[in-house]
């Protein structure tokens, strides 16, 4: 083994330093969107999963505000919560997954479930927030339809009972 090889891993396109692998896994992951925004809410990391989910290429999203994917009517409450997290270093949701709508490049609204990680520098100051997101729109729509059907069934049952049928 030549010098340097002991700390490298073979990838599809080249030999990569082992320290680069975790970042490459995050950037190239296609199942979940991984987004990192700095303290100001500027997107600094946008992985392949985010490209697929939201429709923006990384070079279109990086450097933009998170407002890129936040529905307009939710921006004020989002930034209020963001400011609170930047001040306190904690979120009121703890380790629980969050649910919120997002908006894609073509304007479609999607339902998201995500968890966040507050990242700090060595001195303990907040650098920003990373979010791991999953599009749960289909599941959310199916749940909504089940609730609608259940409500309709209950209404029909109540009507039949009232009619004496």
Image: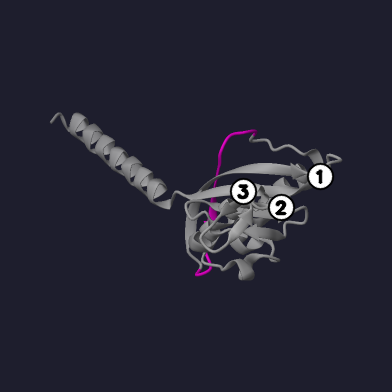
Q: Position of residue 39 (x, y in %)?
A: 77, 52
- Image quadrant in which you'd find residue 71: bottom right
User: According to the image, label 2 marks what residue?
Assistant: 79
Give the magenta-colored segment's residue range.
Answer: 94-106
Labelled pair 2, 3 in contact (Cβ < 8 Å)? no
Labelled pair 1, 2 in contact (Cβ < 8 Å)? no
Observer-nearest residue: 137 or 50?
50
Between the residue at mark 1 and the residue at mark 3, the CA separation in whole angstroms equals 19 Å
User: According to the image, label 3 marks what residue?
Assistant: 22
Instruction: Return the disc, 1 or 3, that comes first in the chain's sequence.
Output: 3
Compared with 109, 148 (above or below) is: above
Residue depicted at x 62% and y 56%:
16
Residue 121, numbered circle: 1
Residue depicted at x 35% and y 47%:
142
Q: Position of residue 149 (x, y in %)?
A: 28, 42
Between the residue at mark 1 and the residue at mark 2, the CA separation in whole angstroms equals 22 Å
């Amino acid at each position: 083994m030549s010098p340097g090889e002991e700390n490298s891993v073979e990838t599809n396109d080249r030999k990569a330093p082992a320290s680069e692998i975790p970042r490459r896994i995050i950037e190239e992951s296609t199942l979940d969107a991984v987004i990192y925004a700095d303290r100001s809410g500027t997107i600094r990391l946008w992985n392949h999963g985010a490209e697929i989910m939201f429709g923006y290429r990384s070079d279109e999203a990086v450097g933009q505000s998170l407002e890129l994917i936040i529905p307009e009517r939710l921006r004020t409450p989002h930034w209020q919560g963001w400011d609170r997290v930047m001040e306190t270093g904690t979120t009121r949701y703890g380790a629980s997954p969050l649910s919120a709508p997002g908006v894609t490049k073509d304007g479609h609204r999607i339902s998201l479930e995500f968890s966040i990680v507050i990242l700090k520098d060595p001195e303990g100051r907040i650098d920003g927030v990373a979010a791991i997101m999953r599009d749960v729109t289909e599941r959310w729509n199916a749940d909504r339809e089940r609730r609608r059907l259940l409500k309709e069934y209950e209404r029909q049952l109540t009507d039949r009972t009232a009619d004496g049928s």
